[in-house]
Amino acid sequence: MMERMAAVLAGSMLVGVGINFFLIPYHLLDGGMIGIGLIFHYYIGLPTGLGVILSSIPLYIYAWYFEKKLFLNSLHGLLFSSLCIDIFSDAITGWNLPIYVSAVIGGALIGLGIGLMLRYGTSTGGTDMLAQILSRKSGLNVGLLIFFIDGCVLLFGLSVVGTSVFLYSFLTIIAVAMLTSVTVMRTA
């Protein structure tokens, strides 16, 4: 139990730092509910963490009724990561990295944070939870479903961030996917 809480706290802080120190300064997007929260932030000024929570409500209502274990294992991850995203929102880095470096580092930190939580049996919920539900019902690979959903979120955000930032955001979701996968791997 203590290891799981430590993983949620550390993972949430990594997600918050990745988003606020590396993505937001360049208006980069991530996929999933974080990406939707970023789109709300860029378009209407809504705090990103709050946007993540609000856009996750329909999934959590579904999970409450039909996927109780997923609901219980991801609710605290959603709340802590959203809180960390909003706590770090006023951070000023003072460095001037090239956008592609920021996209990769931000994605790597987010992927590391998400992977850490997944490794200890929890998650930030959102589209990871949706992909798990769809995978169970369809038999499709959960990783492919997450990548597809992330790509749809990026396409949705294209008009908000523009073409060049969209391409760098694609680097972000690749970094998130790679670091999540590596972090979740168990050594034999």
Image: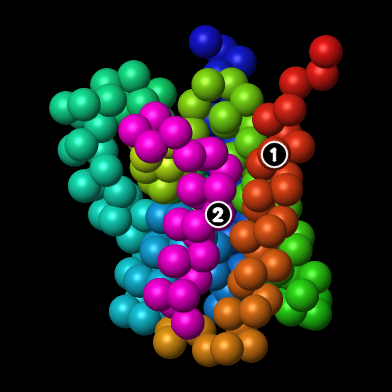
Residue 42 as seen in the image, left or right of residue 62: right
Query: Does dot 1 land on a helix, a strand or a loop?
Result: helix
Of the residues shown, which amino acid type is indicated by label 1?
Answer: Ser
Q: Main secondary structure of the magenta part?
A: helix
Among the two numbered marks 1 and 2 on one chain, the one whose residue lies closer to the N terminus: 2
Of the residues shown, which amino acid type is indicated by label 2?
Answer: Phe
Residue 57 as seen in the image, left or right of residue 92: left
Is 146 within the magenta?
yes
Answer few, some or many: residues within 10 Å of disc 1's Cα (few below 14, many 20 plus, some between 14 and 19): some
**Image-quadrant location for residue 143:** top right
- Does 136 appear above or below 161? above
For the point 68% across and 59% down, the residue is 174
For the point 56% across and 48% down, the residue is 144
Tally the marks: 2
- Relative image position of residue 65 (x, y in whole percent): 16, 27
Is 98 within the magenta?
no
**Image-quadrant location for residue 101:** bottom right
Residue receiving disc 2: 147
Residue range corresponding to the magenta coloring: 136-158
For the point 32% across and 79% down, the residue is 44
- Relative image position of residue 84 (x, y in whole percent): 50, 47
Answer few, some or many: residues within 10 Å of disc 2's Cα (few below 14, many 20 plus, some between 14 and 19): some
Residue receiving disc 1: 181
- Relative image position of residue 128 (x, y in whole percent): 46, 42
- Does 106 appear above or below 25? above
Mark 1 touches mark 2? (CB < 8 Å): no
1 or 2: mark nearer the eye: 2
Query: Does dot 2 land on a helix, a strand or a loop?
Result: helix
Q: CA distance from mark 1 to mark 2?
A: 12 Å
Residue 99 as seen in the image, left or right of residue 77: right
- Relative image position of residue 55 (x, y in whole percent): 29, 56
- Nearest the viewer among 134 and 123 is 134
